[in-house]
Image (cartoon, grey):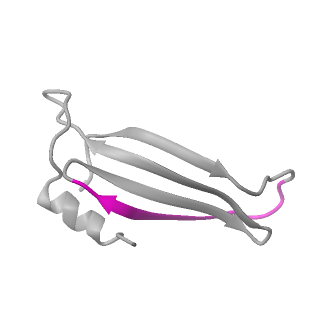
Amino acid sequence: PVLTDMVVGRAEVDFIEPIYEGGFDLDVAIWVAKIGNSSFELAYELSSPIGLHARGRTVQVAVSMETKKSRPLTDDERKFLTGYLEA
């Protein structure tokens, strides 16, 4: 696995269009919004034919399992994440 030993350091969501009843599919788009030294930010959008239902963001932090502290992203992790990076 390329991405291992990560924790969610921050999570936020904006609910836009409520879903009162089911019966339809949701499309979920996920992309890398930002890459830092020891963390990266993912952005999310949930939509359907009705419209945009929610936007979210999370910050994942790379952690050393030995020290239980943040660690820099490896070159392999950074390369993998860059493949999904959108501005």
Residue at 27% across, 69% down:
82
| Image position of 41 with respect to 33: above or below | above
| Residue 46: in magenta span | no
Task: Point out residue 83 in the picture as x, y percentages from the top left corner.
Answer: 30, 72
Residue at 39% across, 63% down:
33
| Residue 32: in magenta span | yes
| Image position of 2 with respect to 11: above or below | below
Residue at 48% across, 52% down:
57
Task: Point out residue 28 in the picture as x, y percentages from the top left corner.
Answer: 59, 63
Q: Residue 36 occupies which quadrant of the picture?
A: bottom left
Q: Is the magenta stretch mostly helix, strand or loop?
A: strand
Q: Residue 69 occupies which quadrant of the picture?
A: top left
Decide if residue 85 is on the left or right side of residue 63: right
Task: Point out residue 22 in the picture as x, y percentages from the top left corner.
Answer: 83, 55
Residue at 26% across, 40% down:
5
Q: Nearer the viewer, residue 46 or 55?
A: 55
- Count of numbered circles on the image: 0
Q: What stretch is highlighted in magenta?
A: 22-36
Q: Where the C terminus falls, by quadrant?
A: bottom left
Q: Where the N terminus falls, by quadrant?
A: bottom left
Q: Which of 5 and 1 is in front in this view?
A: 5
Decide if residue 69 is on the left or right side of residue 61: left
